[in-house]
């Protein structure tokens, strides 16, 4: 069977069949996936029973893997997975469910806010590849919002205003939204804000999109409350249901999203009761957006 791509939504999300991600891919298959990503921004690969090494090998087809050394509160000895992975499960290193008051659990609740991965890094992420190894019976969907369609739908005056702006992103800001404010001096140092353009241009398609994220805490040159209100308005606009595709997980789905043209969030589930073992590899982007012309 050859690779087929079936859209799941008018603008965002498609399902890919006819490929085995455990095997090395041909250049034609890699090109077809990249082209599918450029067009649909989110691709779902059902029934891909891969292990960690296979996930890393597959991910490398799309660029450099971003290592989870910075941008993660866990110390190396506390980690369940290798440094090529962001562990977005609700499990500790013994594969037990984290307690309600576990610090990493409370930190990870930030993933329930609409965001773009690693927008808090000087070089933000290109793709995220998330493998669902164990999924809960109910809840825990991942929702994706199309930031190209959201940009296109802005009033022209607002679009022109947004084009000029540069935002400050830090995990400190996203966590503070949920009242997670206890960070050590070293953690604060690791989370120093970085600047990103609010409107970015996709390197392949040339399409513009809104670069929004819960990590935004300010706009360069603006008073903070005005900036946060403005970002809140844009986020509300950009996450209207017409721009969103919700993914309902089955075990061994692998989902890839393009962080340069989408936001995502995970929806609630009984995370102190049910296991959700999700393993993410992340592909680094090409460079900072702050200097990029919109
Ligand atoms: C992520 C994330 C989504 C999820 O992996 O980047 O935000 O569904 N998680 O767990
Ligand atoms: Mn994320």
Image (cartoon, rainbow, N blue to C red):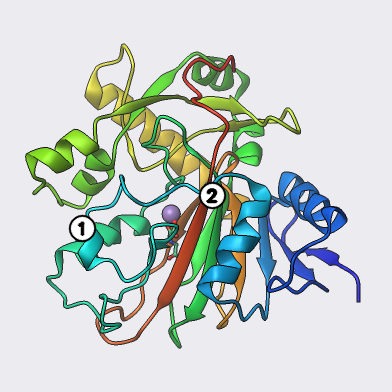
* Residue 54 in view (yes/no): yes
Q: Quadrant of the N terminus?
A: bottom right
Residue holding disc 2: 240
Residue 50: image quadrant is bottom right
- The location of residue 285, given as percent across then percent down, is 55, 37
* Residue 242 in view (yes/no): no
Which residue extends farthest right? 1
Is 193 left or right of 211, judged from the image as shown? left
Relative to 1, does residue 227 appear above or below in the rendering? Answer: above
Q: Quadrant of the C terminus?
A: top right
Is the residue marked by circle 2 packed among few (<14), some (14-19), or many (20+) residues within 10 Å? few
Relative to 144, does residue 155 appear above or below in the rendering? Answer: above
Residue holding disc 1: 75
Q: Nearer the viewer, residue 143 or 47?
A: 47
Residue 57: image quadrant is bottom right
Q: Which circle's residue, 2 or 1, is located before the other in the chain? A: 1
Is 74 left or right of 207, judged from the image as shown? left
């Amino acid at each position: 069977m050859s690779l087929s791509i079936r859209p799941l939504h008018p603008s965002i999300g498609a399902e890919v069949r006819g490929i085995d991600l455990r095997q090395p891919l041909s250049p034609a298959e890699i090109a077809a996936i990249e082209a599918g990503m450029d067009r649909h921004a989110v691709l779902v690969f059902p029934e891909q029973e891969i292990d960690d090494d296979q996930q890393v090998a597959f991910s490398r087809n799309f660029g450099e893997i971003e290592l989870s050394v910075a941008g993660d509160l866990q110390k190396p000895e506390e980690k369940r997975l290798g440094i090529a992975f962001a562990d977005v499960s609700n499990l500790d290193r013994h594969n037990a469910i984290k307690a309600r008051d576990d610090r990493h659990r409370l930190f990870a609740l930030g993933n329930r806010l609409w965001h773009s991965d690693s927008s808090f890094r000087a070089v933000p992420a290109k793709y995220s590849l998330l493998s669902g190894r164990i999924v809960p019976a109910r809840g825990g969907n991942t929702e994706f919002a199309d930031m190209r369609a959201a940009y296109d739908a802005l009033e022209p005056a607002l679009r022109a205003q947004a084009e000029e702006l540069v935002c400050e992103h830090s995990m400190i800001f996203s966590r503070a939204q949920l009242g997670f404010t206890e960070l050590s001096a070293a953690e604060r140092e690791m989370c120093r804000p970085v600047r990103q353009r609010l409107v970015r241009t996709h390197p392949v398609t040339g399409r513009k999109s809104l670069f929004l994220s819960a990590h935004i805490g300010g706009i360069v040159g603006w008073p903070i409350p005005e900036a946060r209100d403005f970002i809140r308005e844009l986020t509300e606009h950009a996450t209207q249901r017409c721009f969103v595709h919700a993914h309902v997980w089955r075990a061994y789905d692998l989902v890839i999203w393009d962080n340069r043209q989408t936001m995502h969030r995970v929806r609630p589930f009984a995370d102190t009761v049910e296991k959700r073992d999700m393993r993410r590899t992340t592909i680094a982007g090409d460079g900072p957006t702050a200097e990029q012309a919109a």
